[in-house]
Image (cartoon, helix red, strand yellow):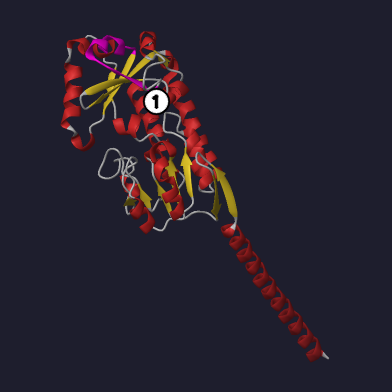
Amino acid sequence: MKVFKTFLLLFSVIAVLLLAACGGKEEKATEKTDQKTTEESTYTIEHAMESTEIKGTPKRVVILTNEGTEALLALGVKPVGAVQSWLGDPWYEHISKDMEGVEVVGTESEVNVEKIASLKPDLIIGNKLRQEKIYDQLNAIAPTVFSETLRGDWKENFKLYAKALNLEEKGNEVLGHYDQHVADVKEKLGDKVNKEISVVRFMAGKSRIYYTDSFSGVIFNELGFKRVAHQEELFTSDNKLGNLAVEVGKEVIPKMDADYLFYFTYAPQGDQEALNTAKEWTSDPLWQNLNAVKNGNAFEVSDAIWNTSGGVISANLMLDDLEKLLTN
């Protein structure tokens, strides 16, 4: 009888273990099925060209704008291919480490379609302003999503890219961190955000005053900085660059004055003509006579970060620059 009871006990234990094992297998099988369903699910993105259906979460992404490259990196996505940075060889210094191994697929203005095809992407992200003429070619390679334009407000494009990558929640997190960064810097700057600012860019043989619709302009607006009133008349309805910027001659240097003056130079590959333009203008007596210059409130900053790259990483770096420059 004792032997029989022992046998029954052992049988019960074995039965329980077998049932647990079967249950575990069924659970794992269910997890795999759910994972497969998620990976194979499709979603539709409305963008500047049309509606595009994307299957699963893209893993091999080609990006065709500089600000888009920063968006992908901020979302934790390393592209397989990207257009070359406007400055750097081939990437901006502030993203070069994160871009190791990424293939160059031309520039924003001249995309290498054959190179893109060779990378076998499952998603291509571009821009209507830059690449509208080759949209059909790109879309024949892989699902292609285009943002509308490229101006100062990079957030709208960022939101589109996050949706296209099926990373909308992560995108909201990145934007939340940025908005908090703006609030933190604004608090640290205190009354200084009520000062008037001016932004100037030197290029090969020409100079511009940048305004509210520029990349830096949008960030200054978010912080609450004011624009100098004597520049308003320069941004008329017939200005070909709208409220982005206006091209000026040396006679306009006095209108560059402000409580704080920030300037940068676009000199790809060390363009000597651009560097000479910057030197010539900043050595001019009119420049030297500006109150911002005489008071030590004229700051030379990075063109790549303050203007050219135009993405979320640079936006955060510009905020860091402002904090350092105006709180020391």
- Residue at x 79% of width, y 85% of height: 8
Q: Is residue 233 visible?
A: yes
Q: Residue furthest right?
A: 1
Q: Quadrant of the C terminus?
A: top left
Q: Amino acid at mark 1?
A: Ser
Mark 1, residue position: 214
In the rendered image, which quarter is residue 253 located in? Answer: top left
Q: Please state the extent of the stretch shown in magenta in the rendering.
A: 244-259
Q: Position of residue 60 (x, y in %)?
A: 44, 55
Q: Position of residue 124 (x, y in %)?
A: 44, 49
In the rendered image, which quarter is residue 132 located in? Answer: top left
- From the viewer's side, name the closer residue of 255 and 221: 255
Q: For the residue labelled by badge 1, is the local secondary structure a helix, a strand or a loop?
A: loop
- Residue at x 69% of width, y 75% of height: 22
Query: Measured along the vertical axis of the image, is residue 78 above or below residue 190?
Result: below
Q: Quadrant of the N terminus?
A: bottom right
- Residue at x 59% of width, y 50% of height: 43
Q: Position of residue 200 (x, y in %)?
A: 30, 21
Q: Judge the density around disc 1: few (<14), some (14-19), many (≥20) Cα neighbours within 10 Å.
A: many
